[in-house]
Amino acid sequence: MSQADTRLSPRFLLSELRLIAVRRRNQAGLAALAAVPVILAAAMKLTVPDAGRGPGQGPDFFSQITGNGYFVALAALGVELTLFLPIAVAMLAGDAVAGEANQGTLRYLLTVPVARTRLLAIKYAGILMGAFLAPLVVATSGLLAGFLLFGAGDVTTLSGTRIGLATALLRLLVICLYLGVCLAALGAVGLFLSTLTEQPMGATIALTMLTVASFVLGQIPQLDWLHPYLLTQHWRDFGELLREPVAWEALIPGLTSAGAYILVFLSAAWARFSGRDVTS
């Protein structure tokens, strides 16, 4: 590969994305994400809806599912956001660098030659693909299952007004994009953890535990001073997109927090990886 190819050719990026797409564990993970909305919709069809949810758990979309299948997608996103979506991103991020080191291919990649900064950027691009694809898979599966079992129609917003289905679908897409940005921040943390070890499972478990701890700490009122700095604090703000008019300003803290996490941990990953002595 020539120096020009190293700098300009998209083959390395396409190869990385293709490798991620064809891995059986990633395909199984997407299938699991898609299965949850189907199970949720079937359960709601067969049982009486819950009367409500506890405080601090985001908007209650479950009570509206039986009236409009659109809300299956929103309820599924809320359910999977606490564990399944973070695990999906953690698997990709943990495997990004540590997986190559574990398989003994990292040294080979760096002797092609490929600059370390470019390699790190390619790995993060793969994580970004998963971060934005995962919510879309959940939402699409939820819509299909919801429309099939409960039908479709105009959507009642959290403000009590009604909007057309086309407008509601556009807002669902924006919700998926917002959650994609949040998960991209999680992926940046995971990429940094992946540069610290040669065991991808270790990085995956560490990132998953960090996410769970962030959710738990966010539920403790005595730690309200810490809440604005938690990685997951603003993830559930996606419900603001279901208000009329949309409370765009309510999304700024979440986007700002995600941007800060991405900047800090990508910088940390670069600092760690650029000076790392690669032996495998």
Image: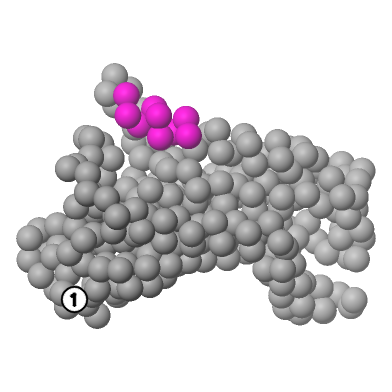
Q: Main secondary structure of the magenta part?
A: helix
Which quadrant of the figure contains the N terminus? bottom right
Looking at the picture, does residue 204 appear above or below residue 135?
above
Looking at the picture, does residue 88 appear above or below residue 242?
above
Q: Which residues are magenta?
A: 212-220
- 176 or 258: which is nearer to us? 176
**Image quadrant in which you'd find residue 70:** bottom left
- In the rendered image, residue 108, in percent from the top left (x then y), is placed at 92, 58
Q: Is residue 192 left or right of residue 6?
A: left
Secondary element type, mark 1: loop
Query: Is residue 245 shown in magenta?
Result: no
Q: Which residue is mark 1?
A: 153
Q: Amino acid at mark 1?
A: Gly
Residue at 57% in and 65% down: 129
Q: Is residue 168 left or right of residue 120?
A: left
Residue at 34% in and 36% down: 228
